[in-house]
Amino acid sequence: MHRLEKRIAIVTGAAGGIGAATARRLAQEGAIVVVADRDADGAEKVAHAIGQTGANAMSIAFDLSDARSITALYDTVIAAHGRVDILHNNAADVSLAFLAQDQMIGELDVSVWDRTFATNARGTLLMTQRAIQEMLPNGGGVIVNTTSGAAARGDVYNPSYAASKAAIESLTRYVAMQYGKRGIRCNCVAPGLIETETMKGSFDPAQAKIVDRQTLTPYPGTPEHVAGTVAFLVSDDSGFITGQTLAVDGGILTHMPHAPDMAAFLSR
């Protein structure tokens, strides 16, 4: 399919994982993709690999927590392509060492909360503001934000991260409300546990087994599952969908907390 033929798409956090998979998928669908990430080498590798397939991609190094870096990113894209049609706000502060500090609320250092919001929520706002400014003169565009299932439920860790993602979900609805009549749609994807390389290298297999028991599909989530959902949301096939959060989590949020244990009990 080439649902996105010649559309200019920015994907942030695209040096690996969900972002890289999304950049590849949008390119397969015909988009001209900007692979944006703090990891300059990783972004370049993804863009180069896309180019090797005959698709069109460029890499740009940027820092989501730096307003000047965001401005430079957009200036480079506009100079190269003249417009922005699609934005996938996927980047977030997910360094493992930092997330390890985001634990119990009673002992949480407020600097962790502030840094998380400064990057995830404020950075997403700044990316979105400039996207709106670039999209409006051209009749609109599509924004998709990556949030998290953690934004919808309480968990045992990472409250700052979860709260920042909840803020992004609220921002999404406001963008949809304020700019829908002017041609801009805005939605969220909320991944569950996705088998990225980072997850495979850091997640305890015993923890993964706990999550797997709560998942309704017989297979784990992959970055390509999320990428396919983003491709749908930025295409005209989802033209009457806006302001929504679509969970890509194998159904983990759809059932009562006791359901897996009850199912095991009843099947004895």
Image (tube, grey):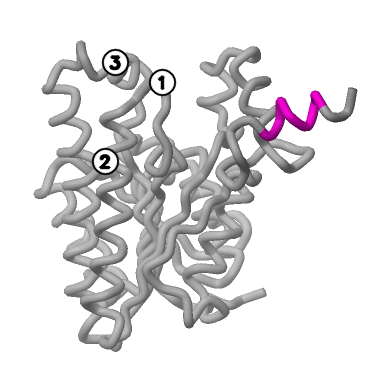
Residue found at x 39% / y 55%: 11
- The residue labelled by disc 3 is 104
> Disc number at residue 22?
none
Task: Work out whether residue 223 or residue 80 is closer to the camera in this orientation and state it.
Answer: 223
Q: Secondary structure at mark 1?
A: loop
Q: Residues within 10 Å of mark 3 (few under 14, many from 20)?
A: few
Badge 1 or badge 3: first in the primary sequence: 3
Q: CA distance from mark 1 to mark 3?
A: 8 Å
Residue 42 percent across, percent down from the top left: 43, 37
| Range drawn in magenta | 259-265
Residue 111 colored in magenta in the image: no
Residue that badge 1 annotates:
156
Q: Residue at x 48, y 41 (%)?
A: 45
- Farthest residue, direction right: 268
Q: Of helix, strand and loop, which one carries label 2? A: helix
Closest to the camera, between mark 2 and mark 3, is: 3
